[in-house]
Image: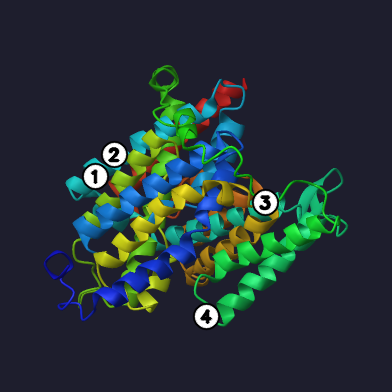
Amino acid sequence: MEKCFKLNEHGTTVKREVLAGLTTFLTMAYILAVNPNILGTVMNANGVFVATALASAIATFVMAFFANYPIGLSAGLGLNAYFAYTVCLGELAGEENPFTIALTAVFCEGIIFIVLSFFKFREQIINSIPQNLKFGISAGIGLFVAFIGMQNAHIIVANDATVVGLGSFSDLDMVLALVGLIIIATLVHYNVTGGVLIGIIVTWIIGMILQATGVYTAANLFPDFSQGLQLGAISETAFKLNFGWAATHLIQFIAITFSFLYVDLFDTVGTVVGVADKAGLLDKDGNLPRVGQVFMADAVGTTCGALLGTSTVTSFVESSAGVAAGGRTGLTALTTGVMFLVSIVLSPLFLAIPSFATAPALIYVGMLMLMSIAKVKFDGDIADSVGAYLAVVMMPLAYSIATGIMFAVLAWVILKVVTKKAKDISPIMWVVFILFALRIVALVANFQ
């Protein structure tokens, strides 16, 4: 352990690292319930569960042994919502097995990231993106994730008069979800380890009690172990790539792939730097040593995840809980990865968790991501202000992360040119601008 993870150098012990790894798993294990719930709208939920657990374990093991950082990885919230709701049910609606096209885009994203990480181009891309846009996009994703959680719990429903409106308090799903949110917030306030996961479980148990007493009748909330673990369901999701469609719809496919790529950039970098800073792992210049290995971990995880049948894998901000518990090395990540493997044998338990129990987690994590809005500077350059603003409002209102990013980038570049500050536009941002402009052309052509 010492030779592999350099425990003494980091002032830690095996016991402390293992406990930290368990803590990290407890705080991020909710993804095993949430991801099948979201991707299950377009894929086999059992297969998604196994794919998520395996991809999370693989990516976290790479983080442990290759980067030696206490960071756990899994399918990213926001990215999975974009995968299911925006791409599969939106842009690819009407296509046969649209999830195969989306998985192909995620696979290509992972390959691109592996190449960029290997040649250290990824760091250069990050440095070229305006800071305000990064914060605005993160906040916009938070609103989008929270909006989806509220929809899943019937807190927000369709309304002919006002497009959307408040659900009915006679709907127990809505009431239970609101109770769950209060439970999670209370547990987090008192620094209870695994507060999000505990909140999901407690909300679910309350629902089962109500069902047992005949109050809740909307669905069966009890786990069904009668059909076994159904591990073979991964055959319904694994290696389901569709390069044929990508070749015949190249511009649209590039736009979808780029949207996954762009969002994952912000998610990973923000999380990694935040967790590393909390762990005291940044150097005197504020840089993270071995950052290329960190990026490689999520790139490999994303590629393997696409092959197995899940959306983009990324670093989880919940890793900060493990750091707070004393985690400083890859042994923490190794422990987290092992727990993801163990969770596979509990698949009927996770898959029985209802939407009203996972929705509070989405709403709460959305709040955490929305906190980035405090870092946005609205009183500076007009391009920075409008770009960040459009990212925040367009994602939830247009129900698309990609659309929010597109409006933010296009507005930023155009306003820089109009205000005679074109010199501020880097070659990378020009490439991004052109890709999104081509996307609009494709949308107009398809509409006509």
The answer to whether the residues at label 1 and label 2 have Cβ atoms under 8 Å apart is yes
The answer to which of 143 and 191 lies nearer the viewer is 191
Task: Say which mark, if any, is on residue 355.
Answer: 3
On screen, residue 311 above or below 321: above
Residue drawn 61% across the image and 40% down it: 226
Instruction: Name the residue tied to disc 2.
Output: 112
Is tag 4's residue or tag 1's residue first in the polypeptide sequence? Answer: 1
Element on which disc 1 rests: helix
Element on which disc 3 rests: helix
For the question of whether residue 420 can be seen, the reply is no
Task: Say which mark, if any, is on residue 241.
Answer: none
Instruction: Name the residue tied to disc 1.
Output: 116
Q: CA distance from mark 1 to mark 2?
A: 6 Å
Specify the amino acid type for callout 1. Leu
What's the colour scheme? rainbow
Instruction: Name the residue tied to disc 4.
Output: 191
The answer to which of 210 and 150 lies nearer the viewer is 210
Is tag 4's residue or tag 3's residue first in the polypeptide sequence? Answer: 4
Is tag 1's residue or tag 3's residue first in the polypeptide sequence? Answer: 1
Residue 307: x and y in percent read 37, 34
Q: CA distance from mark 3 to mark 2?
A: 34 Å
The answer to whether the residues at label 2 and label 4 have Cβ atoms under 8 Å apart is no
For the question of whether residue 73 can be seen, the reply is yes
The answer to whether the residues at label 4 and label 3 have Cβ atoms under 8 Å apart is no
Please identify, in this view, whether the residue under mark 3 or under mark 2 is nearer the observer. Answer: 3
On screen, residue 120 above or below 83: below
Query: How many circles with numbers are drawn on the protein?
Result: 4
Specify the amino acid type for callout 4. Asn
Q: CA distance from mark 4 to mark 3?
A: 25 Å
Please identify, in this view, whether the residue under mark 1 or under mark 3 is nearer the observer. Answer: 3
